[in-house]
Amino acid sequence: MIWLAWRRHRLSVLIMVGLTAALGLWMAYVTHSYDGLVSARIPTPSEVAQLSDLQNQSTVIALLLLFLPCLIGVVLGAPLIAGEYRDRTNRLAWTQSISRTRWTVTKWWVVGLASVVLAAALVPVAQWWSGRTSLQFGVSLFGFAFGRIQPHTFAVTGVAPVAYTLFAFALGVTLGALLRRTAWAVVGTVVIYGLLALLMATTIRPVLAPQVFVPFAEGGTASAPLTSDPQYPWDLGAGFRFAPGTRVPAGSPSASDIGQRCVNLPTGGPACLATHRVQIGEAYQPADHYWALQWRESALYLGLAVLLFGVAILAVRRMRE
Amino acid sequence: MTTALETVGLGRRYRRRWGLRDCTLRVPTGSITGLVGPNGAGKSTLLRLAAGLSRPSAGTISVFGRDVRPNSTEHLDRIGYFDQVRPLYEGFRVEEMLTFGHRLNPSWDDTAARQWLADLDIPLRERVGHLSLGQQAQVALTICMGKRPDLLILDEPVASLDPLARRQLMQTLLSTVADRGTTVFLSSHIVSELEPVCDNLIILSSARVQISGTIESLVADHRLLVGPVAGSPPQGMEVISESRVARQSTLLVRGTVPTAGPTWQVLEPNLEEIVLGYLGTAGTGPVAPVTDAAPEVPTASAPPTDGGPE
C-alpha cells in the first residue's frame, strides 16, 4: 500500500519538490547578491539600483513563503481522495483485499510526510535568507518591524511552517473527502487556511504567552526599554491594564472597558484612570517568547490536523457509491 | 446447493428515488448468473452493493453467508469486482497494475495474471491510458481474477467493446472460472450476450426484480400466444405482456396454457422475447396497444414503433 500511495502521488510530490527547490535557490541568489553588495563602503548609484531590485525580489519571496504551506496543502492534499473519486479509482482500490481505513491512513501519512519534509527542508534556507536580509527588506513590506518574532518572519521560521503545512494538507484531504470535488476542496482550503492564519496572527498568537506591558510615562509617550533591544519585540499596540497589586473585585468591568470609558471622558482622563488604578501603555511579546509561541501555535495546528485526519477516515468509511 | 450471494428486500435509496427496491434474489455457488435490464434499472446499484462499495438503505445482502459490510477485508478477500467504467490508474504501466494487484491482495496469482496478458499480447511496458478499450477491459479483468476471488462481480464487462474484444474477454473469463469453480455474477443490457454463457438469469427493471431462474426453466415456463386482435384470448393465464401489431396480437404468458381456441397459435419463446416481455411490463403493467399509424401496411412483422412511410 505504501508503494501504491507513492506511485499514485509521486508526480505531484515531485512537482512540489521542484517548486520548493526553485524558491530555495531564489532565496540563495538574493541573499548571496545582497551579501556581495552590502559592505562598509558607500554604494554607487548602480549598486543602489541593484539593492532596490533585490528588495523587490525579497518582497515576492516573502509572499511566496507565506503562501507555500497552503500551496502544498492544495496541491498534495485536495486531490488525495477527491482525485480518486473523480477518476472512480476508489472503486478499484476499495475492492482489493485492503480496508478503506488502511487505504486512507497509508495515503495520508505517505503524502503528508512528503509535505512535512518539503516544508521542513525550506525552513533553514528561509531563516538564513530572512536573517541576512530582513533588516533591509522586512521594512518595506510590513512596515516597521524587525526580528524573528514579527508575524511575517515568525510564520516562515522555526517549527511553525511545518505545522502549517501539515494542517493545510489535512484540511485539503478532508475537504476533498467530504465535498468529493477537488476544485471545491481547493477553494475551501485556501479560504479556511487564510482566515485561520489571519485569526492566529491577530487574536490568538498575542495571548499564547504572557504579554509584557510597558505603561506610558506621564505625558503619554512610550518608554523604550524594549524597543532598544536589538532583538525587537512584537508590538501588540496600546492597551490598558490594572496597575500591579490592584485587587480586582469579581464581576467588575475589564481594564480595557474602564480604560476606554476614562479616555472618552471630555475631561479628567488621567484622573479617572488613576482612580480605578488602570494604566495605559503598550503591550508586547518580547523576542525571547519566540519559541514558546512557536511550539504552542504549532501544537494548535497539529491538533487540528489530527482532528481533520480522523474526519477524513470517517468520511471515507461512510462513503456510499 | 450453497449460496454465493443472497439479498432479502434489498433497497438502495438515492436522494429522491430508489435505485433498487425490494430486491430478493439468490446466486447459487458455482453458477454464472446474468443480470439483465435496461440502463438505469438498478443493475449497477445491486452490483455495487454486492461489492461493498455501497450500503443498503433497506433489507440485507450477504456474500457466502456473511452480511456485506464495507471496509471488511474478510468480504473483500472473496470478491473480484469489475466496475462498468473500468477504472484503472491511467498513468501506470500495465506491469505496475500487476504490482498493484500483487501488493494489495495476499491471494494474488502473479503467474496466471502475467500469462493472461501474454496470451492477449498486451505489452507490460505500455501505459494503461495508451491501451485500446478492449485491452483496458482485459487488464481490469486480470486485476479482478488475479486476486483469485470466489465471487466475480462484473458490471457490463463487454459494453462498448468491439465484437472481437467481446469474444476474447468472455473467453478469458469463462476458461478461468471453469477451472476454478468461481461464481460469476455479471450484468448486461443485452440478453444475447448473456444467453450463451449464463446458467441463471435475473431480469431487473425499474429498480425491481421482475423474475429470476435458470435459463431452461424460464423458457419452459413461458409461452407466446399469437392470435387476432379481435378475438378474446383464452382465460385463466398469467399474461406478462401483450403487444399488438396491425391485426395480430402477441401475448407472453407464464405457466401452463389452457387449450387455446383454433385462432390462437402457441409458440415457445426465446430468451430475448421473454426479457422484452418483462421489460415492457415494468411499472405500468402490460404495454399499451400501439396505435396503428399506417393501416395500409399489410405485414404483421412491421416494427410497431415505426411511423408509416412518408
Image: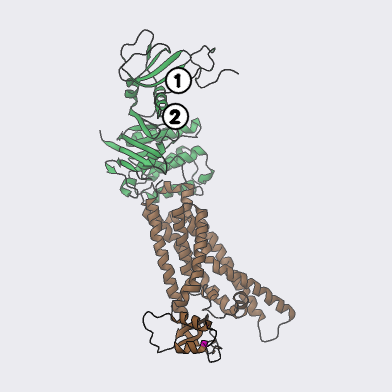
Chain colours: A brown, B green
Decide which of tag 1 and tag 2 comes sooner along the chain. Answer: 2
Q: Give x and y (percent) for residue A154.
A: 51, 75
Which numbered mark, 1 or 2, is in the foreground of this view? 1
**Which residue, given by chain and number where applicable, does mark 2 sit on?**
B190
Tag 2, which secondary structure?
loop
| Image quarter (top left, top right, bottom left or bottom right) of the C terminus of chain B | top right
Amino acid of disc 2: Ile
Verify whether residue B99 appears in magenta. no
Residue beneath disc 1: B289
Q: Position of residue A193 (x, y in %)?
A: 50, 64
Please state the chain letter of the residue tagged with numbered disc 1 in the rendered image. B
Q: Are marks 1 and 2 on the same chain?
A: yes
SS assignment for the magenta stretch, majority: loop
**Residue A195: x percent and y percent?**
51, 66
Relative to residue A153, is residue A33 drawn left or right?
right
Residue A248: x and y in percent read: 38, 84
Which one is in front, A190 or B129? A190
